[in-house]
Image (cartoon, rainbow, N blue to C red):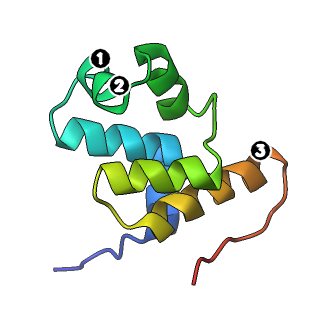
């Protein structure tokens, strides 16, 4: 039996680059919370949440940190995703690492 290695490049090829928005949407769906409920918990509109999830808006590092704390997730990971999305939007092929 041959086992195919499935790495991050394969995931990106099949599903697109990991972004703040799709990670946030995946988190919300994993928690089985509607956009409306999730937005209400944050005190934002459903449209604002939709804009974040679809990548139409990228949060600042400070806002990304607040979101991470609110959902009790690692702050560095979420800030790194927001920064990476900003670089990608500016067509800068740089990798972000948060120590």
* Mark 2 and mark 3: Cα distance apart in space: 25 Å
Report the disc number at residue 65.
none
Residue pictured at 67% horizontal, 58% vertical: 83
Q: Which residue is mark 1?
A: 36
Residue 19 visible, this orientation: no
Above or below, 85 relative to 29: below
Crowd band around label 2 with a 10 angstrom C-alpha radius: few (<14), some (14–19), many (20+): some
* CB contact under 8 Å: marks 2 and 3: no
Q: Quadrant of residue 38?
A: top left
Residue pictured at 30% horizontal, 22% vertical: 40
Front residue of 71 and 53: 71
Front residue of 48 and 19: 48
In this rendering, the label closer to the viewer, 3 or 1: 1
* Mark 3 and mark 1: Cα distance apart in space: 27 Å
Report the disc number at residue 89.
3
* CB contact under 8 Å: marks 2 and 1: yes
Which comes before the other along the chain, label 2 or label 3? 2
Which comes before the other along the chain, label 3 or label 1? 1
């Amino acid at each position: 039996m041959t086992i195919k290695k499935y790495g991050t490049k394969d995931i990106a090829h099949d599903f697109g680059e990991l972004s703040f928005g799709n990670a946030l949407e995946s988190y919300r769906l994993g928690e089985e919370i509607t956009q409306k409920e999730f937005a209400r918990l944050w005190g934002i509109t459903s449209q604002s949440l939709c804009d974040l999830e679809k990548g139409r808006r990228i949060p600042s590092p400070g806002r990304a940190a607040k979101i991470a704390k609110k959902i009790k997730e690692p702050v560095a990971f979420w800030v790194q995703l927001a920064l990476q999305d900003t670089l990608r939007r500016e067509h800068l092929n740089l990798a972000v690492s948060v120590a």
